[in-house]
Amino acid sequence: MGLDVANGVANSKVAVITGITGQDGAYLSELLLTKGYTVYGTYRRTSSVNFWRIEELGIEKHPKLHLVEYDLTDLSSSIRLLQATQATEVYNLAAQSFVGVSFDQPLTTADITGIGPVNLLEAIRIVNPKIRFYQASTSEMFGKVQAIPQIESTPFYPRSPYGVAKLYAHWMTINYRESYGIFGTSGILFNHESPLRGREFVTRKITDSVAKIKLGKLDVLELGNMDAKRDWGYAKDYVEGMWRMLQADEPDTFVLATNRTETVRDFVTMAFKAADIAIDWKGTAEAEQGLDAKTGKALVKINPKFYRPAEVELLIGNPEKAKAKLGWAPHTTLEELCRMMVVADLARNERGFSF
Ligand code: NDP
Ligand code: GDR
């Protein structure tokens, strides 16, 4: 594994972050390194491993960051990971996290996103039950929403194999808390985005496409359901909430959200505006188009291939409990976030960046 366990003893805290190649893993690593932690970030063996996010943050060579090859679906490697690192905090961010793909790969999603976290919970039980565990739960568990806004006690009704798998892991975290006294905390996080978001997710798909259209590298942005409403926050604000959850006196369940919801269409308008392009909307349903207000050219079209078999129509979360108990609040408006992403994607597309 190439672990430098000597760095992890004495007074410094040691954290394992699964999924360091993802958006949240990169930002959380950055945050914990600035707090003096030794961080063991896990990545999967693939034919070409991709560290572009931690490279963009400039932390890939940080002396207290150790990259460890690991797969969440493997119990024995979960046990060895915790033994070798002597971690005191484990943040489980690894998942098959794309809702759309979960309809095509329900069993892989169940293995990784549902059962995977139980490998870590079992490893904690075996190696050191005092380890504090963070599980990356999701607003997708609310699915077909039963109350507005959603809070920790809102009934769940997941609408995708991803949401169902996450709900299993959420309840297993609570079960290990109640059965074995493990410090298992579940963060029910609403959508959070950033310039490091994967391009398969709608916000980054939009900001990257807007940048390409602005630079003449793309004609049309094709989307699915633009009526879907999401509560979008900034990922950097949210990883700070994850850390706060593991510093609390007791393990618990917390919602992190902004308490504002907008449609996908609104985000598209906002992103084009950040690139100085005004959009006029015309038509409805599958024939809807977004036109350049100056030239009349169609820049946005619907492509039904991006519709999902079952959709989550509306998410909006109230983070009152996190505010009261953790002192957490989001600091970034959706307009600021959207502009930040468009500016980053314009710069990247100008230099031919491809992730
Ligand atoms: P990403 O998809 O960007 O990152 C997921 C990470 O999990 C990647 O590093 C990926 O590795 C890793 N991974 C996937 N499968 C495995 C596996 N079998 N073993 C080990 N690692 C694996 O997700 P985000 O950073 O956006 O989200 C982090 C977590 O938070 C996820 O669990 C997600 O479901 C959850 N979440 C995210 C929200 C959001 O809005 N971003 C909201 C609520 C919850 P690789 O690079 O090799 O694919
Ligand atoms: P979501 O995020 O499913 O909420 O899950 P995503 O950005 O994929 O979709 C948001 C909404 O946009 C609609 N949509 C499209 N989505 C994508 N990806 N591509 C399109 O072309 C498109 N057109 C419309 C979707 O139908 C949906 O309604 C994210 C992930 O990060 C999860 O891991 C996390 O748990 C939840 O957020 C909270």
Image (tube, rainbow, N blue to C red):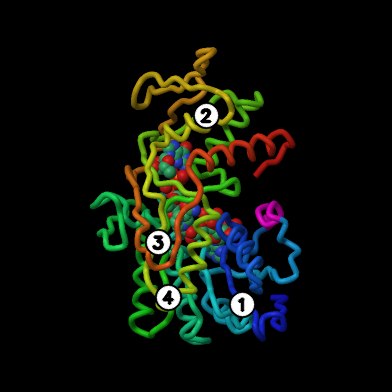
SS of the residue under disc 3: helix
Task: Compute the Cα span from label 3 to label 1.
Answer: 26 Å
In depth, the one of 335 and 7 nearer the eye is 335
Residue type of the residue flagged with mark 1: Val
Q: Is mark 3 within 8 Å of ligand 1?
A: no
SS of the residue under disc 1: strand
Q: Answer few, some or many: residues within 10 Å of disc 3's Cα (few below 14, many 20 plus, some between 14 and 19).
A: some
Name the residue that disc number 4 marks: 184
The residues colored magenta run: 48-57
Residue 51 in magenta stretch: yes
Q: Which mark is residue 323?
A: 3
Q: Earlier in the sequence, mark 1 or mark 2?
A: 1
Q: Is mark 1 within 8 Å of ligand 1?
A: no
Residue 196 in the image: x percent, y percent?
Answer: 60, 49
In this image, 35 relative to 189: left or right?
right
Name the residue that disc number 1 marks: 14
Task: Compute the Cα span from label 4 to label 2.
Answer: 41 Å
Q: Quadrant of residue 323?
A: bottom left
Screen quadrant of the C terminus: top right
Q: Nearer the viewer, mark 4 or mark 2?
A: 4
Q: Earlier in the sequence, mark 1 or mark 4?
A: 1
Q: Which mark is residue 221?
A: 2
Residue 151 in the image: x percent, y percent?
Answer: 31, 58
Q: Answer few, some or many: residues within 10 Å of disc 2's Cα (few below 14, many 20 plus, some between 14 and 19).
A: many
Q: Earlier in the sequence, mark 3 or mark 1?
A: 1
Residue 254 in the image: x percent, y percent?
Answer: 38, 64
